[in-house]
Amino acid sequence: MLKLIKPKRMSDQVFEQLKDLIFRGHLKPGERLMTERELAQHLGVSRPTVREAINKLVAMHLLDHRQGQGTFVNPPTTSADKNPLAAVLNGQDASLMDLLEVRLGLECNAVALAARRASEDDIREIEKSVEDMAAAIKEGNLGSDADISFHMAIAYATKNVVQIHIMKSLYDLLFYGIQENLQHLYTEPINLDKVLQQHTDILNALRQHDPDEAYTAMKRHITFVQDYFRERNIG
C-alpha cells in the first residue's frame, strides 16, 4: 500500500513562495513583479519554471499579466467567478456581522495556537504589520493592507496547515470585511487608534507566548467591532 515519495516540483515551490508573499502582504496589490529572468536568478531556477508558477498564479487571479508592461499583483476580489467561497455565498446575502461571527471562533483559536508555536520570525512578521498599520494611520490612511497582513501572519504562526488554508480561502472576504470595518470605524478616528492598541495587545501576548491572554485579546478586538456595528445597526 506504500507509494513512492515524489519530490516537489520546482515550479510548485516557486508558486508557494510567491503565493505566500502575496497572502502575507509582502507583495502589495498593484505592485509589479520582478521579471522572469530576475526571479529565476534570485531563486536559482530556470525561466520556464518561473513562468509555470506565474501562469498558475495568473489562473488563480492573484497575478495579472499585462502585455508589454509586466506582471502585477491583483487586488483582492469578492466576485463569485474568482473566489470559490464567494461562489458558495453568492446570493446568500452574507453580512459583515456574519463574517465577524466566523472570525471570532476561527481567529481566537488561531491566536491561542500561535502563542504556543510562533517562532521569532513569526513574531517579527506580526510586529512589522503592527508598525505598518501605525504608520498608515499616522498618514491618514485606513491601514487595511497591514491589518490583513496581521491576521494572515497569525494564521501562519499556528503551524496548522488547515488553519492556514482556511484563512487563505477567506482571504478575499477577509480583506473586504476588514476594509469595510475600518471605513465605518474611521467615521470616528479614535476607533482606529483603539484597533491599533488591540493589535498591540495581541502582539504582546504572542511575545509572551501566553495562549490565554492572546485568546482574550483577540476576542476583545473582534467583539469591539461587533459591538460598534450592533450599536449603530451596521452590517
Image: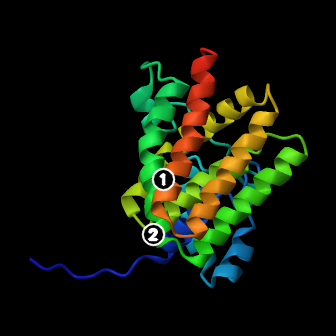
Question: Residue 19's image quarter?
Answer: bottom right
Q: Check disc 1 and report its element: helix, strand or loop.
A: helix
Task: Give the vertical position of 131 relative to 85 (above or below).
Answer: below
Q: Could you tell me how many numbered marks the image carries? A: 2
Q: Which of the colour schemes (rainbow, by chain, secondary structure, one colour) is used?
A: rainbow
Q: Nearer the viewer, residue 6 or 138?
A: 138
Q: Say which label, 1 or 2, has the lower sequence index.
A: 2
Determine crowd level at label 1: few under 14, some 14-19, many 20+ residues with C-alpha closer than 10 A.
Answer: many
Report x, y in % for residue 219.
51, 44
Amino acid type of the residue that numbered disc 2 sits on in the rendered structure:
Arg
Q: Nearer the viewer, residue 2 or 36?
A: 2
Q: Nearer the viewer, residue 211 or 178?
A: 211
Residue 52 shows in this picture:
no
Q: Check disc 2 and report its element: helix, strand or loop.
A: helix
Quadrant of the snapshot with the N terminus: bottom left
Question: Residue 54's image quarter?
Answer: bottom right
Residue at the farthest bottom position: 44
What label does residue 116 carry, if any?
2
Provide the residue designation for mark 1: 215
Amino acid type of the residue that numbered disc 1 sits on in the rendered structure:
Tyr
Residue at the farthest right position: 139
Quadrant of the snapshot with the C terminus: top right
Q: Are marks 1 and 2 in contact (CB under 8 Å)?
A: no
